[in-house]
Amino acid sequence: MSAIDIIKRRLKEDRIPETPEEIGQKKKRPREVAFMDVNLCFPCGKCPEFCPVQCIEYLAAGSVPGRGVQPVQDRFQECIGCYICVEVCALLTDYDAVRMYESNLVEDVLGVKITDAVPPEPIPAQPYEEYFSEGGLYRHVGKGSRIREKMTAEERAIFARERVRG
Ligand code: SF4
Ligand code: SF4
């Protein structure tokens, strides 16, 4: 079993029974959506690999001043709120850079509607660091990984083997 299999299984046990096994697309409005803290993202490229709706992208050049390789951010209008990127970043990297925010809050802050469908055209991701980062204006949901404390020693060993070294 791989680390991503463990993440999916544990998330299903914990709260998200509909975490998709295959690459898919948003079908219902999520209660929470993810934001990467662009100041903490290395970027290692691990979470884009595992997002089940492939909505995490590298920011355009110059988006975050002073960074050569830009950090990643998700197109939150496509996010299904599955927590996979939170767990991948917390458990497979040294960065712990992803948090979830209530969709209602995001709508109020950004003046948008988060619906049950993806936008007709992808809306490019933005840094949003003034809102959704450790020093930002708004509080995230929870404290990051939901499953860290639930893993067995065997599962921890698998994570240790697959961990990205920055
Ligand atoms: S897993 Fe974390 S550090 Fe790696 S690209 Fe994603 S947010 Fe950045
Ligand atoms: S929570 Fe993360 S992995 Fe899941 S859909 Fe949203 S951006 Fe992708």
Image: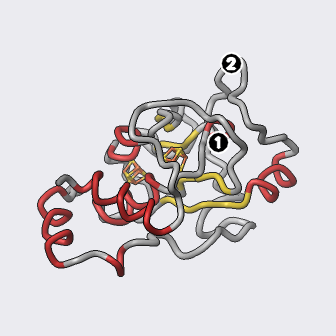
Give the residue furthest to the top: 121
What residue is drawn where x is 61% and y is 62%? 133
Q: Is mark 2 within 8 Å of ligand 2?
A: no
What residue is drawn where x is 84% and y is 40%? 113
Amino acid residing under circle 2: Glu
Residue 30, percent across and down?
68, 49
Amino acid residing under circle 1: Phe
Residue 131, percent across and down?
71, 58
Q: How many numbered dots are placed on residues in this image?
A: 2
Where does label 2 land, which residue?
121
- Horizontally, residue 71 falls left or right of residue 31, namely left
Query: Callout 2: helix, strand or loop?
Result: loop
- Horizontally, residue 60 falls left or right of residue 23, namely right
Q: Is mark 1 within 8 Å of ligand 2?
A: yes
Relative to residue 147, is residue 62 depicted above or below?
above
What residue is drawn where x is 35% and y is 75%? 148
Dot 1, crowdedness within 10 Å: few (<14), some or many (≥20)? Answer: many
Where does label 1 land, which residue?
76
Dot 2, crowdedness within 10 Å: few (<14), some or many (≥20)? Answer: few
What residue is drawn where x is 28% and y is 52%? 5
